[in-house]
Image (cartoon, grey):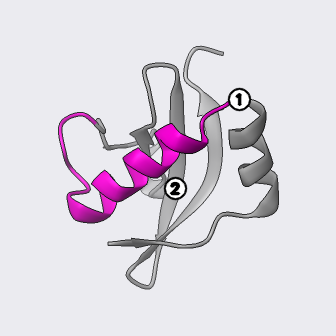
Amino acid sequence: MKIKELRNDIKEYLKKHNLEKKYQKAKQLFETNPFHHSLNTEILEPKHNKIYSFRIDKKYRAVFIYINNTIEIIAITNHYK
């Protein structure tokens, strides 16, 4: 599964929170195995919206949608806020 190029605002968020290396590691793992146990990939509620997330680290998640056999990251979120 291929992840689309990130939007500039998401790249800036990763840079601001020092998550660039962690994101790249999670991205490679996701593209190899989207359901690897360390990613904790899940569908978010309400499920009919078909919005998913995977773990970047214990604190941050990448929120994404499927578009034509590719993944688009729509946000990076602090899981505890």
Left or right position of 78 against 22: right
* Residue 7 image position (x, y, % from top left): 74, 64
With 10 as the anchor, is 58 left or right in this view?
left
Secondary structure mainly formed by the magenta segment: helix
Q: Amino acid at mark 1?
A: His
- Residue 27 placement: quadrant: bottom left
Q: Earlier in the sequence, mark 2 or mark 1?
A: 1
25 over 17 or under it: above or below: below
Q: How many marks?
A: 2
Residue 72 at x, y = what percent? 55, 66
Q: Residues within 10 Å of mark 2 (few under 14, many from 20)?
A: many
Q: Residue 17 — which label?
A: 1
- The label on residue 60 is none
Of residue 30 and residue 49, the one placed in the foreground of this image is 30
Does the residue at mark 2 contact the one at mark 1 (Cβ under 8 Å)? no
Q: Is 42 displayed left or right of 81 in the figure?
A: left
Q: Residue beneath label 2, please? A: 64
Q: Which residues are magenta?
A: 18-38
Q: Is residue 70 above or below residue 28?
A: below
Q: In this view, which residue lies farthest toward the front? A: 21
Q: Is residue 73 left or right of residue 33?
A: right
- Element carrying mark 2: strand
Q: Quadrant of the C terminus?
A: top right
Magenta stretch: residue 33 in it? yes
As displayed, is residue 69 above or below residue 63?
Answer: below
Helix, strand or loop at mark 1: loop
Q: Residue furthest bottom?
A: 68
Look at 31% across and 43% down and name the residue there.
41
Give coordinates of residue 22: x percent, y percent: 48, 38
Q: Residue at x 38, y 81 (%)?
A: 69
Residue at 65 percent of width and 47 percent of height: 75
